[in-house]
Amino acid sequence: MTELTHAIASTHQVFNQPPPLENYNAFHGDRMLQYWLRVFGAKWAEPRLMEFGHQVGHELLQAGFQANKHIPEFLPHDRFGHRIDQVDYHPAYHQLMQAAITAGHTHLPWTMQEPGTHVARAALAYLHNHADPGSGCPLTMTFASVPAIQTQPDVASCWLPGILSGHYDGSNKPWYEKVGLTIGMAMTEKQGGSDVRANTTVAVPVGQPGAGQLYSLLGHKWFCSAPMCDGFLMLAKVEDQLSCFLVPRWREDGSKNPIHIQRLKNKLGNRSNASAEIELRGAHGWLVGEQGRGVATIIQMVALTRYDCMIGSSALMAQAAKEAIWHTAGRSAFGRPLHLQPLMLNVLADLALEAEASLAISMRIAHALDNMQDAQQAALVRCATGIGKYWVCKRAVLQTFEAMECVGGVGYVDENVCNRLYREAPVNSIWEGSGNVQCLDLLRVLSRESDCLNALIAELEAARGRHPLYDRRLEQTLAMLVQTESLEYAARHILQHLALCWQAATLLLHGEGWIAEAFVRARLGQSSLQFGCLPEGINTQAIVERLLVRIDNRTAG
Ligand SMILES: Cc1cc2nc3c(=O)[nH]c(=O)nc-3n(C[C@H](O)[C@H](O)[C@H](O)COP(=O)(O)OP(=O)(O)OC[C@H]3O[C@@H](n4cnc5c(N)ncnc54)[C@H](O)[C@@H]3O)c2cc1C
């Protein structure tokens, strides 16, 4: 090629584009996570998290992209026409499941005696979410199913060894031939998801009736995620009484349990996870807990999946903020580094503050779960999880959008993880009790369970005197709780106040002082919740630096 043709062929050099944030240790690079892990007593888990964080920042990050590109495929029949109801996943999905289960995502608090196991497991779940939130769905459900299944000791003795084994087995065979088991959940029906009393699926005993006995289920479920799980906790009515069942994918005799998958949903996000519509045509399942106690039984699982929505959305926000900071730190605009320009600093620091406040209250719940023998901590879990689920999941939708905008046009394209974080965010708010349902549940709990109200007030009161803006807001918020008229109408307003007070209290009591000061001024000292409107005098640069991922030779590889 002559010099001239070479010059014509090469149109430009690519410059002023940062390298992708990859090949790093996702734990070592996250000072915020390290901080909250230590504050709530799980420093001992650092070696485990260093190892998992390395996988997340390297091969699992890539696996996440693969699993979201090559989405699950539904195969209703085999080539001879037999029904198989099979969903095939890309190998990357299995890799993600395997790594997370081996690290302890589904079982750590149930199998390890160390104090702080919930906090350590929350950190694992948070890190896994960085690689792929979609596979987090069956991981969460498996983890959360344990207390509900324990309600029925004879069923638990058969299933828990596999659920808690720390092994993943993605093969399509009966549960009793596997070492490692995963669990799903199917409550939602077409005519009502929030109102499960409207369920029409019925169950009749196969032989003897009663807890632990086998029943036959007839009906449908409008959403059943991760349909290749080995078993599913489901609600069905026995003589018009809503009851909970563990329904395996295979029957005891080795035949396929008739759980017919109708189709998989095409979804906005959460692509690596399959979400099915199913029909139960005489599917067998064991009654878990007493007949008519279905909601009371399955709510033990739902309480934990709601908590995991908090962790998941905190992780989405942390990753979004880190991506925004990483990108802008590697880019100049109008002749100056983008992440150091005042207006961008204002936005980036605000995104980081939101992520930190969300992680703080998620870890606070993990800490309370680690101390359930203390009645006040148990009561706090019962009421504060709903507040966190409502607020953190809603804020994630806005926060991930703002982070994507910081990255600019390249943030919007499919190859960029920011795009996936934004598409993923709404689902945590919708499933496991949508926003209004969280509000109504909280009002119900606070009005009926005085220990919950007392635990929540004690948690907020503990931070009184730490900041005048906090004290003022706390007074306003507590006053709202005693105005019993129009509580339902005002429920979102009340929850927002409670959430902001609780985030501020957690930061004031347990956080870094300068972060707490910034959050209180930003969220309690002004009315705007728009990102990038921080008041003057906040050390935005230090807040941004805290979330700037450092890749050093020890952690890259
Ligand atoms: C990707 C995905 C996967 C899912 N996977 C599963 C799964 O594996 N298993 C499963 O069981 N379900 C699953 N779901 C279903 C999900 O849990 C439900 O969609 C959710 O509970 C809401 O139920 P619904 O869709 O019937 O909406 P509805 O119950 O009709 O609610 C619609 C809206 O009305 C609000 N609302 C309800 N009652 C009131 C009231 N009294 N006052 C004011 N507002 C109210 C709700 O907050 C909601 O915003 C999944 C959903 C999605 C999107």
Image (cartoon, rainbow, N blue to C red):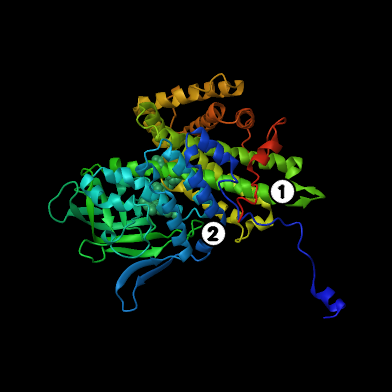
Disc 2 within 8 angstroms of ligand 1 (CB): no
Residue nearer the viewer, 516 or 419: 516
Q: Earlier in the sequence, mark 2 or mark 1?
A: 2
Q: Which residue is mark 1?
A: 329
Q: Position of residue 75 (x, y in %)?
A: 38, 70
Residue at 39 percent across and 32 percent down: it is 371
The tag on residue 79 is none
Q: Amino acid at mark 1?
A: Ala
Residue at 60 percent across and 23 percent down: it is 469
Q: Secondary structure at mark 1?
A: helix
Q: Which residue is mark 2?
A: 59
Q: Position of residue 349 (x, y in %)?
A: 66, 39
Above or below 105: residue 2: below
Q: Residues within 10 Å of mark 2 (few under 14, many from 20)?
A: some
Q: Secondary structure at mark 2?
A: helix
Q: Amino acid at mark 2?
A: Glu
Above or below 320: residue 255: below
Left or right of residue 481, residue 338 in this image:
right
In this rendering, the label closer to the viewer, 2 or 1: 2
**Residue extending furthest toward the bottom:** 1
